[in-house]
Amino acid sequence: MVDWKYSESIESADIVSIQKKYSNYIGGKFVEPKSKKYLNTVSPSTEEILAKVALSNEQDVNSAVKSARSGFETWSKLSPSQRSRYLFKIARLIQERSREFAVLESLDGGKPIKESRDFDLPQVAANFFYFAGWADKLDLSWSTKTLKPYGVVGQIIPWNFPLLMLAWKIAPALATGNTVVLKPAETTPLTALLFAEICEQAGLPAGVVNIVTGDGSTGSQIVNHKDINKIAFTGSTQVGKLIQKSLAGRDVGLTLELGGKAANIVYEDAAIDQAVEGVVNGIFFNQGHVCCAGSRLLLQESIHDQFISKLEKRMQSLRVGNPLDKNTDIGAINSKEQLDKITNLVNEGLEDGGELFQTECELPGNGFWFRPSLFTNVQPSYSIAREEIFGPVLTTLTFRTPEEAVEIANNTEYGLSAGVWTEKGSKILWTADRLDAGVVWANTFNKFDPSSPFGGYKESGFGREGGRHGLLSYLKASS
Amino acid sequence: MNVSNISMQWSDVLEMIYDSRIDAVGLNERVNSLATRSIKKESKLEALNMIVSMCDLTTLEGEDTEGKISQMVAKAIKPNPLDTSISSVAAVCVYPSLVSVAKEKVRNSNVNVAAVSSYFPSGQVPMESKLLDTKYAIDSGADEIDIVINRKAFLEGDFRKVFDEIVALKEVCKDVHLKTILEVGDLKTYENIRKASIISLAAGSDFIKTSTGKLSVGSSRQACYVMLKSVLDYEILTGVKAGIKVAGGIRDAKDAIRYLVMINEEMGSEWLNPDLFRFGASSLLDDVLKQIKKLKTGAYQASYYFPRG
Amino acid sequence: MIDIKKTYKNYVGGKYVRSESGKTYTQELKNEFYELPLTSKKDIRDAVTSSKEGYKKWSSATPYLRMQILYRLSEMIEGNKESYAELLMDHGLTKQKANKDIDEAIQNIVWFAGLADKWEQLAGNLNPVSEEYFNISHQNPIGVVFSLSGSAVSLNELLMSILPPLTVGCSVISYSEENSVLALKLAADINNSDFPSGSLNVLSGKFQNIINDVSKHVEINLIALHKELENQGLKAIEENASESVKRIFSQPSTDGLSSILPYLETKTVWHPKGT
């Protein structure tokens, strides 16, 4: 009997040259941290140390904010058309160096090269292209007379889509006339630092973009800085709340893009095979490290067994392994810390009484890995049905009527995204209207586009990124 | 190999047909995603060899003669005489009037003789004519029969007629392996392909086949995906494993490998054998042979190194 | 001679209610004393419960109906112009200023009424995504809005603190401190305008008393403050708000379209296009 195994097809890492040590990018130059301290960044698929990056302190942040302030003076004096040209240039340069960025992203963060090459990088370039085109026509965007940039914006981004999150932050901020101090996540700083090279290549005026690396303390320094006009944060709801609290009483703008526990609702009259694909994509894309992941499968009871059987079969063909292997579907978990979180929640699920299915696959020896997992026989009160796991773990709940589906879907403090699967058009629209979610994917999932606003209801945050509405995150209306 | 018979009640067939819901955009995305697999080195060589063993080397032209068939059969038995590690193909596929000469030339080999019938490719004649040319092909010694479904009846909504015709033709075939051609280029939508697949499977087809190769729109990986899902759903209901043949427009090895990837990941590697999967091929075989030689020698090849078929 | 003055009540759920605490506070206007409800935290709780119901009814009304109801409010006020002018003059405004204020107020109500069935066209749109998908960003009202009106005694400013959220379908709890008499008088016209009960509740009191209860109440989706707060009140509110990621707006713009933006949540819906 045939057992056709795919040979390794490794994307060469030669295209990237990783330095041993990185400095911050402040005022148009690479500057060693005043703190004199560094952090190691590790490849989660091998646990090998890739490089040292600066652990920035208060002085470093202060330096960055000062240069962003003077950068703002410069940036404001340019015409909108000139700002637009810089952004287009950056977009083009990213496109040209896409492969390099993709490989680096997979090495530093653990996601499969297939994703960073086919999803992350194209979206990054597209975001810069899209917002470049808004820079010189803001007056058309919203019919209000008095929208102005905030000034200096502090941006703190997560480790799940490092370069893409950078693009979602920097592109609109610059297009609307702001300047930025951006801190990439502790575990994934390298593509942001490579992006600094792009800024240099593009001749971006000094101080318009500043990149400081560090950990949570560095982030706090940015949030607490007296001369920041706005903070844009993407990360956990827990930290988002702390930031909102820190900014209380300070007249600093804020947008938050936080966690989620999205419901993926599959009605009995869905196109079942495509719904299976959508559910798989919803939770296993990017190892489930996605704020808008479809982590709760809400399945109409009448099709439960049939659907689960197809789902388990489909999960079995997911390939877990070396992120640089072009055939890998599921890469490494981003850090030991995250792996522990996932493991603990899964154990809780088992203790509560959930039934666990995991695919059979060999996991590499080194590195942080978790098999694609599916829980059935779950009650809405279990922690795996309520807490964000942020890993490749899907929890199944059942419903009987559309009203019940909506009720269960909305029964959470989160409200970022949701999925709806049915071939009946009126039911799609009815359901979408009632879901308290900033993004509703009907008969699809995990679709993104720079022109499409993204953001949450309730404790998933406020403000939108992308599209015409995304501009409002970086423009304030003066009375 | 399974001997299929009618294993579903007509009412069940109807239920399955009307339950057919497919989202085209989602399906295309899945098929395209499978096409990003990178098959290299040993796994590529393995794939190429599998493809050879799954080929039905085909000629269906008005100008076919005994001489032409003889050449093709020789190639079918020994695709590359300078590399004996390469197996024979699965079958040769010819018009009924060429079956006896093909049968004579394949003796002492493992190559089957498949014949198209039922007034291939259009099927636009009364049932008696279809039965007649099928009987003729079988009497001439065909091991396999490839028929076409009645698209006229299908598109008129007379699914029962489509079903009954296949049942009748299967009866004529008895133990002869029956492949039913859906002609996806005429059916157009994915739902139609699924419906036609189910009707054909329920009526006792051993294989469902994408195309006659006579239309500009031949096989597509999307059509194959719809068909394989139908085959799997049919297996769940009846326990019967039917096969799939893709034909028409598969020009190169790269594309053929993509089909194998799809079968491998959607169905499982136990479906990767000539009893359950076939390629209807003419130029495909040459490209596969070239690729095999390139893998073994490291150099790009020219077609004159390989015998004409 | 001290006249018996009307005791004003809060307006909640389409009814006039006293504060459950029984307490009131007094405002003196031109030698007359008005007793006003001193809203307690239980009153807030009840108001929110009513506003939740009101939100369901108001947001599911058609834009056309909302427009008509808002327009009716302008008709009501128009009909009561004289008594509003009198009250404003009691507060110390000149006759001229009072009439100007009322005219502006009516004009704005009419403007927002006409916006009720149009704002979605100005704030929502299709998005030109680069794959075969239908993609639309709707705007939806955020829910229950607590609006602290400004200290100026002005019918127009009071209404401008209510109209933007109301027009887009939010239910509003309008809270006044210094201009409570005016607000609670307005409640009578609101009552006559067919607003679904709970869609617009009007309360009075000392904001300091309830600042924590309001900023911590999870079912208030947004707090809009139309005046500056003392004693770091804004800081306290924003800190409390962070516990549930509540949206806080301090002195939001009342300029045209930007006045409604804070009260909207964008929902983007995707659907494939295929055969």
Image (tube, rainbow, N blue to C red):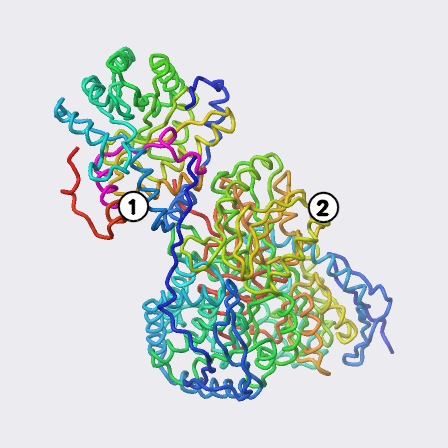
Is residue C113 something one can see in this rendering? Answer: no
Q: Amino acid at mark 1?
A: Lys
Q: Residue at x 79, y 64 (%)?
A: C43
Residue beneath label 1, please? B254
Q: In terms of depth relative to the viewer, which is nearer, A116 or A93?
A: A116
Image coordinates of residue B133 in percent, x first then y, are 24, 14
Closest to the observer: C84 or B272? Answer: B272
* Quarter of the image with the N terminus of chain A in it: top left
Q: Is residue C251 magenta?
A: no
Q: What is the CA distance from the residue labelled 2 to the residue labelled 1? A: 47 Å
Quarter of the view holding residue C82: bottom right
Q: Which residue is mark 2?
A: A353
Residue depicted at 75% across the width and 70% down the height: C204
As drawn, is A322 to the left or to the right of B97?
A: right
Q: Quadrant of the C terminus of chain A?
A: bottom right
The residues colored magenta run: B268-291
Is C113 situated above or below A371?
Answer: below
Q: Amino acid at mark 2?
A: Gly
Chain of the residue where label 1 is placed in the rendered structure: B
Label 1 packing within 10 angstroms: few (<14), some (14-19), many (20+): some
